[in-house]
Amino acid sequence: MPKTKEHTKRRKKKPAKIQGLATTALVYELKSQGYGDPEIATQLGIDLAQLREVCETMLTEKAHDIAARSKEVVYADYCLKQDQNLYALDGLIEELDSKTQYNAMIGAIRLRSDIHDKKIKVGQDLGVLHKAAEQTLHTVQGGIAIADMSTKDLRHGIAELAKNMGAMVAQFGDRKYDELPTGDLYYGPSVPDIVTSGVEVGSPAREKPKKKKKKRKSRRVSHAEI
C-alpha cells in the first residue's frame, strides 16, 4: 500500500502530562539555577505550554508552603541559607589570604560582616528577635523617655496635655499670638517687697539728688572805682 502524504508527514509526539511534587520541585531547582524555559522544557521532554502549567502549579504550592510556615520556621530557613554563604566566604577568605590578595579579602570580610548584621535585622523585622527601642527625638520628649513608659502612663500624659491645651484655648482662644490681649503691665519696683518677721522690707525709693547751689563770684572792686 503506497504511503500517502498524511503518512509521510511527521507527527508531533504528544508529551505525557507531567504531575507530582517531584516535577515541580525539579522545575523550581532548575529555575533557581538560572535555566531558561526552553532548556527546562527540553530537559523534561514537554512543550512550553505544559511548562507554564507546571510553573503555575509550582508557584501555587510554594505560596501555600510559605503561608503554612510560621515566622520562626521562615527565619530558621533564612539563617540556614545565610550560614551556607558564610561557610563559602570563610573558605574564600582563607584562599585570598594565602594568595596575598588582601583587597579582595577585605571585601569578603566586609560581606561576611554584612550577612551577620542582616541576619539580626531580618530577625527583628520578623519579630523573632527582640529589638531595643531607639532613644531618638520620637521616643524622648522634654527629657522623658516615652519609649520606656507604659500604655497607662502615656494615656495619662496625653490626657494632661489635652487638658492644659483646652484651658489655654478657653482662656485665650485659638487666635494668633500677636492678636492676644496684652493685659495689664506692671509698673512696680523691680525687686518685690519681702515681709520678714513682721517688718516690711522693700526696695528703698531713690531720692532725687539735691542740686548744688552755685556760689556767687565776688566782684573785685578796683581802686579807680573807689
Image (cartoon, grey):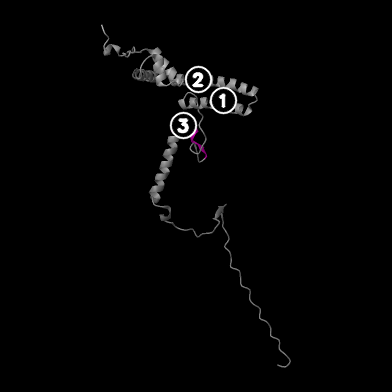
Task: Determine whether label 3 and label 2 are within 8 Å by CB.
Answer: no
How far separated are the C-alphas under marks 1 and 3? 39 Å
| Residue drawn at 62 percent across, 23 percent down | 96
Name the residue type under label 2.
Lys
Q: Residue furthest right?
A: 223
The magenta span reads 143-152
- Residue at mark 3: 150
Mark toward the start of the polypeptide (1 vs 2): 2
29 or 38, nearer to the observer: 38
Identify the residue at horizontal 38%, vertical 48% (top origin).
170
Q: Quadrant of residue 210?
A: bottom right
Task: Give the amino acid at mark 1.
Answer: Arg
**Mark 3 falls on what kind of element?**
loop
Element on which disc 2 rests: helix
Q: Position of residue 87 (x, y in %)?
A: 56, 19
* Number of residues whose C-alpha sits closer than 10 Å to that of mark 2, classed few (under 14), some (14–19) or many (20 or more): few
Distance in Å between CA atoms under marks 1 and 2: 13 Å
Return the residue at label 1. 112
| Circle 1/circle 2 CB separation < 8 Å | no
Q: Residues within 10 Å of mark 1 (few under 14, many from 20)?
A: many
Residue 198 shows up from this direction:
no
Please tell me the numbered disc located at residue 159.
none
Q: Quadrant of the C terminus?
A: bottom right
Question: Marks 3/2: CA distance?
Answer: 39 Å
Q: Is residue 13 left or right of residue 177?
A: left
Under mark 3, the amino acid is Ser
Where does residue 57 sit, x and y in percent of width and height? 36, 18
In the picture, measured across the screen, residue 91 lies left or right of residue 20, that is right
**Residue beneath label 2, please?**
81
Q: Nearer the viewer, residue 138 or 174?
A: 138
